[in-house]
Structures are given as C-alpha cells and as structure tokens.
C-alpha cells in the first residue's frame, strides 16, 4: 500500500497520521465556515477560499478539524474491527492492504 495515500479511489479519503484528501478537507471547510468569515468575505469569498493555500479564519479551520475528527471517529466506530487490527492496518499502509492483515 501507499503510505502517502492514493486519492484516485476516493476524493474524500482519510489516511494514517490524521491526513485526509484535498476533497475531504474542502468539504470540512465548507461545513465549518463561521459567521465572521461570512461577514468579512461574503459567502462567495469564502467559497473561493476553500482549499486554497490562504486559510480561512482560525475559528473556521479549528471547526474543520473538529469535523474531520468526528468523521474519523464515525469511520472507526463503523468499521467493526479491533484497535489492534486498525493499528496494524495503519502500519502496512491503509485500507487497500486490508487482506494482508487478516
């Protein structure tokens, strides 16, 4: 498996080490735009900033991190595997190597 993460399979992937695909990061930002950003930039300005190198406000970026953490937690809960299995999976490179752990 590719430890860096191959996003060709899914544009909204999560990877070992807390990394996610650009697509998932943009979704998290869009779900997290705070009122201050909307007032300062307008909705169109916020949309144009999503996924760009210049971050939105600290409040929006912090909330995007919370959204990603919640998504990761839901994925872990839904997986039905043990912590030991998940850790072994992360060590060998991710979901595409799932059969190597079994």
Image (cartoon, grey):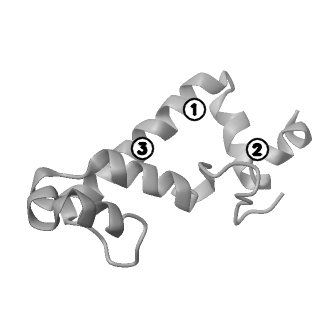
Q: Position of residue 58 (x, y in %)?
A: 20, 64
In terms of secondary structure, where does tag 3 sit?
helix
Q: Indicate which disc, 3 or 1, sits on the residue closer to the N terminus.
A: 3
Q: Give the residue pinned by disc 3.
A: 69
Identify the residue at image location x=68%, y=38%.
Answer: 86
Q: Sort mark 3 into few (<14), some (14-19) or many (20+) by Cα contacts within 10 Å.
A: few
Q: Indicate which disc, 2 or 1, sits on the residue closer to the N terminus.
A: 1
Question: What number is the disc on residue 76?
Answer: 1
Q: For the C terminus, which image quadrant?
A: top right
Q: Are marks 3 and 1 in contact (CB under 8 Å)?
A: no
Q: Indicate which disc, 3 or 2, sits on the residue closer to the N terminus.
A: 3
Q: For the N terminus, which image quadrant?
A: bottom right
Q: In whole angstroms, how far apart are the C-alphas of marks 3 and 1?
A: 11 Å
Q: Sort mark 2 into few (<14), some (14-19) or many (20+) by Cα contacts within 10 Å.
A: some
Q: Position of residue 39 (x, y in %)?
A: 8, 59
Q: Give the residue pinned by disc 2.
A: 95
In the rendered view, does 68 fall on the left or right side of 4? left
Q: Position of residue 101 (x, y in %)?
A: 85, 39
Q: Are marks 2 and 1 in contact (CB under 8 Å)?
A: no
Q: Is residue 65 visible?
A: no
Identify the residue at image location x=83%, y=39%.
Answer: 98
In terms of secondary structure, where does tag 2 sit?
helix
Is 63 located above or below residue 101 in the figure? Answer: below
Question: What number is the disc on residue 85?
Answer: none
Identify the residue at image location x=70%, y=66%.
Answer: 4
Is 73 located above or below residue 25 in the figure? Answer: above
């Amino acid at each position: 498996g590719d430890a860096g993460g191959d996003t060709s399979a899914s544009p909204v992937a999560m990877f070992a080490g807390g990394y996610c695909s650009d697509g998932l990061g943009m979704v998290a930002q869009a779900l997290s735009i705070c009122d201050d950003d909307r007032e300062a930039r307008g909705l169109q300005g916020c949309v144009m900033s999503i996924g760009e190198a210049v971050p939105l406000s600290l409040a929006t970026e912090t909330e995007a991190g919370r959204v990603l953490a919640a998504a990761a937690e839901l994925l872990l809960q839904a997986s039905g595997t043990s912590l030991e299995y998940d850790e072994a999976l992360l060590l060998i490179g991710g979901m595409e190597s799932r059969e190597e752990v079994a």
